[in-house]
Amino acid sequence: MSAIRSLRMRVCRVLLSAAVLLGSGTPRHVAAQDAPERAAVVVASKPFGESFLLAEMFAQLLEAEGILVTRRPGLGATEVAFEALRTNAIDVYPEYTGTGLLAVLRDSMTTAMREDPRRLFARVSDEFARRYGVRWLPPLGFENGYAIAVRRETATRYRLRTLSDLARESGALQAGFTNDFIGRPDGFVGLRVFYGISLRSVRPLAPAVKYQALSSGAIDVIDGYSTDGLLARFDLITLVDDRHFFPPYEAAALVSPRVSAERADVIAALSRLSGRLTEGDVRRWNALIEVEQRPIADVARGALAELALVRAAGTGDVATAGRAATSGFLAYSWARRAETWRLIREHLVLVSIALAAAIMVAVPLGVLLTRTPRAAAWVMQGLGIVQTIPSLALLAFMIPVLGIGLAPALVALWLYALLPIARATYSGVSNADPDAVAASEALGATAWQRLWWVQLPLATPAVLAGVRTSAVITVGAATLAAFIGAGGLGEPIITGLGLADSRLVLSGALPAAALAVVVDLALAAVERAVTPAYLRRRRTGV
Amino acid sequence: MTVALEAEALHHAYGITPTLRGVSLQVRTGSLLAIVGESGSGKTTLLRCFNGLVQPTAGAVRVDGVDVRGTPGDALRRRLGFVPQTGGLLPHWSVLRNAALVPRLIGHADPERAAAEALTLVGMPPAEFGARLPHELSGGQRQRVALARALAARQDIVLLDEPFGALDALSRAVVHEAFEHVRAELRFTAVLVTHDLAEAARLADEIAVMRSGVVEQIGTLATLQAAPATAYVEELLLRATAAARPLVGQ
């Protein structure tokens, strides 16, 4: 285990120095490498508002104690975040007891646990320690369970107050739920059976569009969290869980085996939050983030000051942030320009390293396969299968081996980039002017000479077309790398989706789209420049 | 008399279809042997046995009296000039560079000078044509460059695989002239595969008639005309004469 960890560190270090050599901005995680005796504590979150807020509060609390912190906000989903924690790739993130029991332990909820959250906490706390060496710190003090919400107008029309009422009227209603909720046994899977709900339709929707879809009337029912600030913003009614289906979801800090064993200072600092947060406070803070779109760091600072856990900060920056939130998108983008440039540079580092590595492997591979056409079919099929693995799943597969951050993201992007280049090289080399290849063989050119003098030069335009395809794919796929903490333009997209903040989403999505277009045009120019004269002229009709 | 090329009892088959069924022949040094036959007669397979692109299943091939089985394929092919049916020039290389391919392969001291000399011989002066790319030439010009490429390293033996077959009549006449001029100049041994008996009659010292993987007769045109060995040879001669009569008559 420690051997794998040190190997991983070495891989990271090599890749990071490569990133620096590429002349781009130094990624934030480099700071972690600079503390030789005390490694930074990696604080992470899942991609939704409250998780961002709690993680930021953890981070600021640790920093107030002089502990070095690295932030990795918005990790994929429970599977990604927990896998990263278990393997010490991150050190702490906020989790909920109900999720721990059902999604991680895959246990079932007993009636006793439903009635007494302390029994549930005891169960997850024991099992996590026994199975994974992972530690639950005492709960923060509030619950954030699933909530089912409808528009006020819908509630009045169908006389909906409880989930039993919803079951009665469900045939007439359309729902939009997050993917997470639809697939979980403690989510819609169990709820449907428990209450006998059969909705007219259920659509999977991202958190960002869910509320808009509901308020526009496109759907009637959504899932949410009980501390959700957006419930207030859209004037929604949450239905009462009258038969107690939803298990208790007490929030708590979940701590990695490494920190549990070695860092008493971290445990002590984080434990100061235990039992201090109430549902009302958290909903109010969430609303500041989700409704008023205040910066998370400011809200966290204010919250910690309210709890008298850190000294109160000046209110100046909170007010400025509030004004920025009400100005137009252009002004917003301009205010974010430094951050956007940093993200673009990070994105380009991800794409260029992955692409360069893919070219170095896929071109020789494509050439090699022209020598063994039988193996070619198998290899191409294999690469094709990699291509069909959903990006997020591929990223998740990397975590046990490479942890989170730059390394696994690069490996995943590299795998995606291989196929178009290998296939283009293979077909470019095998289809290179057969008469010219046969003639040079008949005149005594060796296989290598035929390759270097004839096949590769003639295949160059095809190879570059493959590189171009891969580059555009990689620019797009790299936005997902933010799910495993590799940064880049996916960062504001994921955070924005989690906060239902479409401006934040656009501040990542627009540059990413522009980058794809620019990369495509640039490579098209290179392609034209290296196309042999005879092909170029033929194309223009000589 | 010395023998430059020799095939002895060659057998070959693609899968279960026999293509050569015991072919034996000799090509005298400095002479041109034309191999005439229809598609599928085995004439191209025989040619490819000489430079090792096809391995006979039985029998022997000797170049200058030495069995080729001892020579690696690449080395053997560099010794023998080759002109394919469609030129096969490298499309991204200039005419001069194309013609210099074989001198470069054998490590010639000045490949471009050798290429320039060969281009001049075939009537493609390098000053005018050297910098052009193959797609800027006519079909006949491309075949002349291919001929120059085959000869630039001053090979003693040249194999020609229907090199004039795809040309129109006028270009073919021009290339024939260029070819005869070069041969008179360099006096190399040549094997010319063709389906055109008239072309064979014009260029060859001896003609081998092939059919179904067997040599039916080998000899000068006069020998073939005086005593056709088989009905097929007789028919082939008759048809060629019939086609040429209107012109000959005048």
Image (spheres, coloured by chain):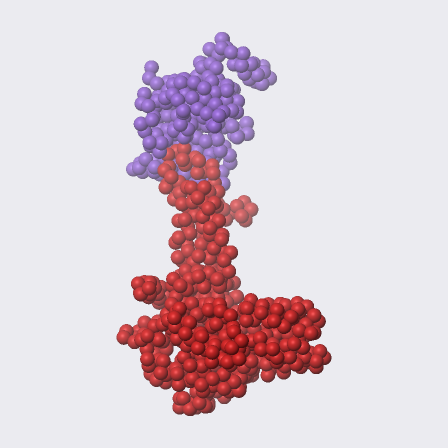
- Chain in purple, by letter, is B
Query: Residue at point 59% right, 83% down?
Result: A232
Asked if A93 appears above or below A406 in the picture, the reply is below
- Report if residue A134 is visible in the image: no
Residue A470, image x, y percentages: 48, 57
Image quadrant holding the C terminus of chain B, namely top right
Residue B93, image x, y percentages: 42, 42
Image quadrant holding the N terminus of chain B, namely top left
Query: Residue at point 49% right, 10% down?
Result: B229
Total marks placed: 0
Quadrant location of residue B108? top left
Identify which residue, A195 or B36, lies in the foreground. Answer: A195
Residue A200, image x, y percentages: 68, 68
Extreme-front residue of the structure: A112
- Chain in red, by letter, is A
Residue B77, image x, y percentages: 37, 31
Query: Residue at point 55% right, 27% down?
Result: B169
- Report if residue B60 is visible in the image: yes
Identify which residue, B246 or B160, lies in the foreground. Answer: B160
Identify which residue, B167 or A246, lies in the foreground. Answer: A246
Extreme-right residue of the structure: A157
Extreme-top residue of the structure: B227
Quadrant location of residue B71? top left
Asked if A541 appears above or below B63 in the picture, the reply is below
Asked if A126 appears above or below B222 in the picture, the reply is below
Query: Residue at point 41% right, 79% down?
Result: A137
